[in-house]
């Protein structure tokens, strides 16, 4: 076995003691490093051509910035704006000057410093599924998200060491009123997990409340919070060629307080972007860089990442498709473009399947392989995603974590010392023996190979005797054991009480305004 149960953030449970041990044996907390050379479908000339195309979009066509404050900042920096218009055009020299200010690598430190993550370089981090309105499991079927399901999925997020970020809401708890939902959700997230959290850029109050709650949970002063990244936001452009008001407002607020932004255009080829992959990536680059320029104007050197969400659609129905050959290539090309600009890259472990079945497995496997081969740094929706993002599946969460662990094991360097090359062991066994009993094997067998927690490697007869349980049903049993034994990570009582008091005060004040 390559690792054991986590050392931080979780203790042995009474249920685990009754059952004779923890729900699973999993890898230790670790930040994967991608040692492989990235796959690069485009030549240097093609990369330069995409760059040229993106610069022409920014100079000749422009991007719509539906936020007056953002337009003022960009105009003061030298961008072209016109009275009565939301269009902003940018000179390529200004774009490249500002983008170069963004660091190629940065660290985000949550309330538990042992859960700090490195973003950029060859590091990879994985985050839970985020923002679906529905959730499902084999027992209760598909249902609209509620707070208890939200908490369940947070517990799975905290439990698995292969999940590094507590991204957006793993399911939208629609039983909480939108005006106060962010308050209860962040209270749950900051008490059930101790990992890096995220703010939705959906209005000033929500962003400011999340930053303040993150600061309180970590026990920091305002100066300490603003001195380094401790949370982040992710914004999506409204493709084609548009950044809307709340997304820009939230990113600007985070930038002013030293917190990173991931800028993720949603460029589905054939729908919100050109049907050609090169055209879709060109638009992704233009939309992403334009917002990063804005953030660098506000706070030079603020950490930013660019997010690739370029895939294709089913041209018969218009439905998004993921885990496709086009998604794989678009992600790999996006990796080339991110490295060209020196920016960390975000992509997703996405699928379009409606059930945690073989289709979900192959689409997610292709998506995950694309992010690894592309050199992606931040993998959103790494566990639990179904239905093109409309559903969070408990079983899919478990299945994905098995895949993530196997990929993390795959990424480990392979040692090749004299002892590893094992000439003496080969001599000892010779042509008539076997290696099961060799000293070389006995010294290494416990840690020689990755040991899965979900795969069943038994023969057919043994599997049949145990009830012929397939992987999805094994995942069902696994999440139940995990939730039965789960305890939240420690949080100082004074911080918890301060958080609770903040939530109650903001609720009395009305939380965030809504349209209903």
Image (tube, helix red, strand yellow):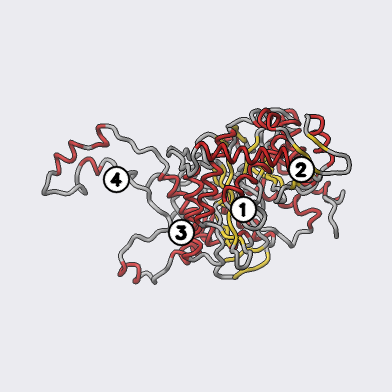
The answer to whether the residue labelled 3 contacts the one labelled 2, judged by CB atoms less than 8 Å apart, is no
Q: Nearer the viewer, residue 199 or 511?
A: 199
- Rendered residue at 84%/55% (across/down): 514
- Between the C-alphas of marks 4 and 3, the distance is 26 Å
Of mark 1 and mark 3, the one earlier in the sequence is: 3
Residue identifier under label 3: 19
Of mark 1 and mark 4, the one earlier in the sequence is: 1
Other-residue count near label 2 (Cα within 10 Å), few / some / many at <14 / 14–19 / ≥20: many
Of mark 4 and mark 2, the one earlier in the sequence is: 2
Tag on residue 154?
1
Q: In the image, is residue 423 above or below residue 223?
A: below
70 horizontally vs 443: left or right: right
Q: In the image, is residue 371 above or below residue 414?
A: below
156 horizontally vs 502: left or right: left
Mark 2 vs mark 1: in front: 2
Q: Quadrant of residue 318?
A: bottom right
252 horizontally vs 363: left or right: right
Of mark 3 and mark 2, the one earlier in the sequence is: 3
Residue identifier under label 4: 445
């Amino acid at each position: 076995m390559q690792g054991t149960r986590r050392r931080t953030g979780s203790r042995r449970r009474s249920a685990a003691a009754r059952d004779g041990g923890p729900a699973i044996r999993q890898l230790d907390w670790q930040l994967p490093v991608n040692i492989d050379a990235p796959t690069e479908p485009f030549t240097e000339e093609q990369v330069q051509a995409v760059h040229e195309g993106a610069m022409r979009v920014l100079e000749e066509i422009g991007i719509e910035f539906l936020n007056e404050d953002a337009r003022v900042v960009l105009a003061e920096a030298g961008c072209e704006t016109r009275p009565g218009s939301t269009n902003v055009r940018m000179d390529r020299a200004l774009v490249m000057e500002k983008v170069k200010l963004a660091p190629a690598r940065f660290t985000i430190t949550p309330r538990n410093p042992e859960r700090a993550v490195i973003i950029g370089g060859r590091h990879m981090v994985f985050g839970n599924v985020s923002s679906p309105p529905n959730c499902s499991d084999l027992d209760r079927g598909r249902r609209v998200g509620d707070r208890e399901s939200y908490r369940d999925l947070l517990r799975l997020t905290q439990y698995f060491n292969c999940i590094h970020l507590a991204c957006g809401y793993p399911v939208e708890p629609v039983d909480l009123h939108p005006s106060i939902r962010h308050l209860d959700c962040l209270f749950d997230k900051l008490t059930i997990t101790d990992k890096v959290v995220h703010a939705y850029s959906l209005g000033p109050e929500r962003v400011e409340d999340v930053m303040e709650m993150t600061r309180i949970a970590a026990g920091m002063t305002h100066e300490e919070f603003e001195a380094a990244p401790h949370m982040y936001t992710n914004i999506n452009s409204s493709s084609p060629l548009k950044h809307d008001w709340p997304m820009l407002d939230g990113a600007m607020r985070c930038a002013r307080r030293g917190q990173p932004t991931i800028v993720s255009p949603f460029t589905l080829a054939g729908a919100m972007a050109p049907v050609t992959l090169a055209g879709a990536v060109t638009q992704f680059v233009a939309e992403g860089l334009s917002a990063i320029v804005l953030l660098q104007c506000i706070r030079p050197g603020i950490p930013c990442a660019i997010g690739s969400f370029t895939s294709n659609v089913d041209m018969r129905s218009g439905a998004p498709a993921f885990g496709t050959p086009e998604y794989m290539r678009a992600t790999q090309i996006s990796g080339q473009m991110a490295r060209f600009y020196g920016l960390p890259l975000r992509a997703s472990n996405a699928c379009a399947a409606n059930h945690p079945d073989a289709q979900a497995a192959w689409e997610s496997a292709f998506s995950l392989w694309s992010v690894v081969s592309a050199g992606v740094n931040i993998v959103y929706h790494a566990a639990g995603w179904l239905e093109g993002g409309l559903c969070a599946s408990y079983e899919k969460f478990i299945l994905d974590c098995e895949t993530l662990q196997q990929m993390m094991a795959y990424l480990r360097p392979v040692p090749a010392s004299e002892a590893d090359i094992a000439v003496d062991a080969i001599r000892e066994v010779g042509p008539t023996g076997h290696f099961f009993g060799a000293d070389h094997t006995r010294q290494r067998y416990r840690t020689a190979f990755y040991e899965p927690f979900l795969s069943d490697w038994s023969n057919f007869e043994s599997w049949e005797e145990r009830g012929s349980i397939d992987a999805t049903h094994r995942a069902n049993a696994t999440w139940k054991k995990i939730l039965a034994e789960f305890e939240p990570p420690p949080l100082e009582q004074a911080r918890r009480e301060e958080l609770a008091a903040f939530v109650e005060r903001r609720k009395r004040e009305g939380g965030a305004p809504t349209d209903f």
